[in-house]
Image: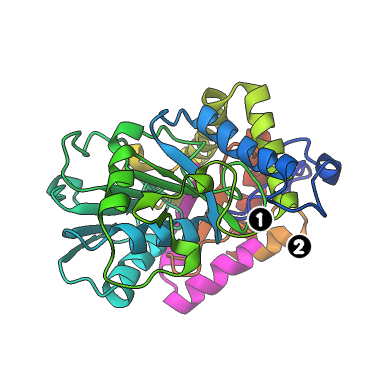
Amino acid sequence: MKPTQKPNRPFFSSGPCSKRPGWSLARLENALVGRSHRAKPAKARIQEVIDRSKSILGIPDDYVCGIVPASDTGAVEIALWSLLGTRGVEMLAWESFGSGWVTDVLKQLKLDNVKARTSEYGRLPDLSAVDFANDVVFTWNGTTSGVKVPNGDWIPSDREGLTICDATSAAFAMELPWDKLDVVTWSWQKVMGGEAAHGMIALSPRAIERLETYTPAWPLPKIFRLVKGGKLIKGIFEGATINTVSMLCIEDAVDGLKWAEEIGGLPTLLERSNANLKTIEAWVEKSDWVDFLAENVEERSNTSICLKIVDPWYQGLSAEEQTAKAKQLVSLIEAEAVGYDFGSYRDAPPGIRIWGGATVDAQDIELLLPWIDWAYGELK
């Protein structure tokens, strides 16, 4: 039967993600609009985002953290173009965003000594085969596959190369072993539900040393430059950004970070994301038509929760029909104003992708799931 109860907040997009509970535009009324981002109070507000992020995430004191242009994509590109080229590179990819970094390194940077370790949607490549004498680039959580690395045990503490980690859909929702990560990037619009356009990058002392002792063979655009005269540009990590930031976005980021602190910090953020995954796990366990795209339980994402349709009826359809039916399922629910933007990513296998980050309430996911059952029944 068609359900009657609807989620209070029907926002399940994997980016930009749901705003935090209780958010409203009124939270931005103190934004320093009309002020220079170089002005003292604006610079202090920017620094507040950096300081609160470092505190909540538990970033070590000897790491630096800064705001950079172009969201997480810009942050990763800065790392790739600024750090790679002095030794071999291992690229790990098991979904579209990781595959994008492989393309950039092979076809844009055109590095020769590159090993791409890839796997299909639903599984990780062989992490035990990674050679850490090389630099290693990977996503912590595959946003479009719902497959994450389970922990940092596979990364040695005595590695020779750098580890460059795209953690945009993992930061604030998963434990990150900072001692195993030399470069970590993320963006505000994921787990914290902030506004887009700006990224963040954290650098270990080893990454800083690389920046100050290695000059790439290629020219670097201004927005990629973290070094001047052989020294780290410290201002980038002290509130003086590479280019102009939106003070509205800064205010929104501060609001989200304050909310995180008020509810209990990182432990509570992790609990909220894990509760969302558990809600979906209980539903999948009872279902005969849907299953997780991630093949191993310990590799299931608690943020980008990706599901595949396993019903024999659906599996008997052509690939085009499967894609169309999966899109129709999402459209049926959107038409009821029950849930928005939870279809699988365009490059992923057709199915469902429900965002389970900390800004989403488990109760809303619980109310969404019967509607998904209903919509699937309508299709079938």
Which mark sits nearer the N-terminus, 1 or 2? 1
**Within-10-Å neighbours for mark 2: few <14, some 14–19, many 20+:** few
The Cα atoms of the two marked residues, 1 and 2, are separated by 36 Å
Q: Which residue appears at 47% of the width and 78% of the height?
A: 320
**Magenta stretch, residue numbers:** 303-330
Question: Is residue 163 highlighted in magenta?
Answer: no
Residue 375 coordinates in the image, percent (x, y): 65, 58
Quick check: can you spot residue 178? yes
* Horizontal relation, residue 350 to residue 357: left or right: left
Q: Which residue appears at 66% of the width and 45% of the height?
A: 368
Q: Which residue appears at 55% of the width and 74% of the height?
A: 324
Q: Nearer the viewer, residue 266 or 329?
A: 266
Number of numbered tags placed on the structure image: 2
Per the image, label 1 sits on a secondary structure element best described as loop
Q: Which residue was labeled with disc 1?
A: 245
Per the image, label 2 sits on a secondary structure element best described as helix
Residue 107 coordinates in the image, percent (x, y): 30, 77
Identified by mark 2, the residue type is Ala
Residue 252 coordinates in the image, percent (x, y): 72, 44
Marks 1, 2: nearer the viewer: 1
Q: Looking at the image, is 379 positioned above or below residue 276?
A: below
**Within-10-Å neighbours for mark 1: few <14, some 14–19, many 20+:** some
Q: Which residue was labeled with disc 2?
A: 335
Q: Residue furthest front?
A: 229
Identified by mark 1, the residue type is Val
Q: Which residue appears at 17% of the width and 41% of the height?
A: 159
